[in-house]
Image: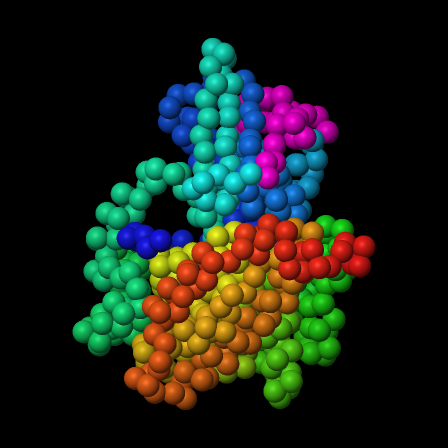
Amino acid sequence: MAQRESISVFDMLKIGIGPSSSHTLGPWRASERWISELRKDGQFDKVESITVNVYGSLSLTGKGHATDYALILGLLGADPEIIPVEEIHSLVQEVKSTQKLNFDGKRALDFNVEKDIIFHKKFLPFHANGLKFQALLDSGKKISKTYYSIGGGFVVVEERKNAKKKNMAFNTFPYPIENGKELLEVCSQESKSISEIVLANERSLRTDEEIDYQIGRVWNTMLECMYTGCHTEGKLPGGLNVKRRAFELHENLMGDLPYTNPEEWLQSIRQTEVKFRQILQWVSCFALSVNEVNASLGRVVTAPTNGSAGVIPAVLMYYLVIENHAGNFEHVKQFLLVAGEIGSIFKKGATISAAMGGCQAEIGVSSAMAAGALTELLGGTPEQVLMAAEIAMEHHLGLTCDPIGGLVQIPCIERNSMGAIKAINAAELALGSDPSEAKVPLDKVVQTMWETAKDMSSKYKETSEGGLAVGVFLSDC
C-alpha cells in the first residue's frame, strides 16, 4: 500500500463541503478533473450528453453522503472551497426540475438526474469507491473515464498517471520521509522538531507567504465551522431527525459572555470556568459542532476526512482556549504541520478511507494526528509525538464504519468527540512516558491498521450493510 509520493499538509487538510471527503468532495473533484481532461483533449465542446456510473461503497451509501449533489455541482463547475453553501440546494434542485445541466457553466445539456447518475452495488476491482464518467460526442462516439475516490478528497485513476509527478516532488524535498522511523532519524540528525522538518519540506513547494496564507485559510475555516455549529439549532437533514447538540451545550457553557465574531468568541471562551467536566464538555462541543455542520452540507476541512473533520479543530481549540491563553497563529501553524505529517504517514503506509479500512482509517487517523500535534505544542520530543500518535491509533484499531441510513450522523458525529478526547489523553500519556520503553512503534501500528483493514469484512467498510447500520432500524430513529 505504501506510496512513495509527496504529500503536503494541504493535501491532508483540504477545504471542502460535507458530509464526506470520499463520497462528496472526491466525486466533486473527479467531476472537475474530468472536465479539465475533456478540455485538454479538445472534446469539451463536442459533448452532447453525460452519464455517471457510481460503484461499490460510493454507491451503497452515496445518497446519504450527497454523492449525487457533489456530481451535479462538480459538473456545473462550482468550486467546493468558495461556493456559498446556502446556494447548494437551489442549484441542485434547478437541475433536477429543469432536467438541464449547464456543463461547467458554459453549455446547457439535457440531464435527468434519476437516469443519468446510476448507482451500482457491484465493486470495481481497483478500489471500493469507483465512478465512471461517460460522454456521447457530436460525432456519435462514446468516451469514458474511470476515477477512484480513495479518501480525504484524493482522486486517482488506476494507472496513477499523477504518481510520477508526486514521486518527482517527493525527491525535491530536503527531507523525503515515508514512515515514522525515517522521520525520527531526520529529527535526530538535524536536531529539529517535527514541525520544523515538515515546514522545510513545504518550502520546496511554496513560499513562506503562501504557506502562512494557506494555514490561515484552513484554520479560519475550522474556527468558522465551529462557530457556525455552536450557533445553529434544530435537526439535521436526511430523515433520521438527529437533534443538533452543540447549540445547547454551547449555551450552557458560555453563559452571558459577550462576543460578535469567531475571534472574539475564542477570547470569551478563555474566560469560562474549566474544571474537568467543563473541559470534556467544551472539547465535545467543538467536535460535535464541526460534524453537525458537515452533516448539513456545510463547509469543513478534511482532517484527514470529512467524517473525522471535528477531531483536529476540537483539540487545537482545546489548546488555545484551555491550555495556552497566549496561543497564537504560530501555535496553530505548528499544530497543523505536525498533524499533516502524521496523517501522511498513515496514508502512505495504510489508508485514510473508511471504504477501505473502516472508521479506524478516519477517526483513528484523525485522533493520531491530533494527539501528535498536541504533544509537540505541549513540549514533547519527536519521539513522544509519535508515541502519542501510536497510542491514539492503537485504541481505535478495528473500529468499523457502519453509518445508519448511509448518513454521516450516527455514530459518526459522536465518534469525533470520542476521538478528540482520546487524542488529548494519548498526548498526556506520551508526555508522561519514556518513548525508549514503548513496546509498539508508530510504524507497527500503521502496518497493523492496514492488516486489520484487509481482514475486515466489507460490511463494516462504509457500505451500511453491517453493524449499527443494520442493527438500528430507521423506524427506531
Which stretch appears magenta?
A: 97-121
Q: Where in the figure is residue 422, as x and y percent of width and height? A: 53, 76
Out of 159 and 94, give the one closest to the viewer. 159
Residue at position x 60%, y 70% from top?
417
Residue at position x 46%, y 84% from top?
428
Out of 334 and 303, give the one closest to the viewer. 303
Residue at position x 56%, y 20% from top?
49
Which residue extends farthest left?
A: 189
Q: Where in the figure is residue 175, as x and y percent of width and height? A: 23, 62
State how many labels appear.
0
Q: Where in the figure is residue 80, as x and y percent of width and height? A: 54, 45
Q: Where in the figure is residue 466, as x and y percent of width and height? A: 63, 55
Q: Quadrant of the C terminus?
A: bottom right
Say whether residue 464 is left or right of residue 333.
Answer: right
Say whether residue 361 is left or right of residue 290.
Answer: left
The relative height of residue 81 versus residue 281 in the rendered view (above or below) is above
